[in-house]
Amino acid sequence: MEWATKAGWRETAMGYLDTDQNWNIIDKIVEIGEARGRTPAQVALRWVMQKPGVTAPIIGAKRMAHLEDNLQAATFELSDEEMAVRGHGWFVVAARARARGC
């Protein structure tokens, strides 16, 4: 959670999603991204893209840089181990990453 504080995130901004489980998932997303040279948004979007039944993840790019970053999620795949991480944190992190300018 230290990286989130440095990025300017407030715990209260997540409201009902502010749980230890979600923060642990977000930490894992950041860890995967750092190991792969990817942003948290790319990792989270890739996770959604690889879920069975998902035909088109919806992105909310406000700036061209957001769109360019998000599109990079289509250029790699997550391992089975990385896909095994579960919870709402995957869906939260892409929005939070965009909010901090990623």
Image (cartoon, grey):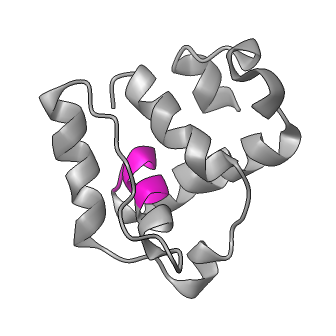
Q: Position of residue 40 (x, y in %)?
A: 45, 47
**Is residue 44 within the magenta segment?**
yes
> Which quadrant does the C terminus fall into?
top left
Q: Is residue 63 above or below residue 83?
A: above
Residue 10 shows up from this direction? yes
Look at 35% across and 55% down and name the residue there: 38
Whether residue 87 is situated above or below residue 82 in the rendered picture? above
Counting every numbered tag in the picture gives 0
- Is residue 91 or residue 100 the one in the foreground? 91
Q: Give the residue at x 22% y 70%.
A: 75
| On-image quarter of the N terminus | top right
Q: Residue at x 33, y 57 (%)?
A: 37
Q: Is residue 101 left or right of residue 16?
A: left
Indicate the quadrant where residue 78 lies.
bottom left
Query: Which span of residues is magenta-colored?
Result: 38-45
Q: Position of residue 35 (x, y in %)?
A: 45, 63
Can you give x and y, in whole percent of width and height, for residue 6 in the image?
A: 56, 19
Specify the principal SS of the magenta part. Answer: helix
Q: Which residue reaches farthest bottom?
A: 80
Tell me residue 50's x, y (percent). 46, 75
Queried whether the magenta region covers residue 37, the answer comes back as: no
Q: Is residue 34 visible?
A: no
* Left or right: 13 as drawn, with respect to 74: right
- Does 41 sit above or below residue 81? above
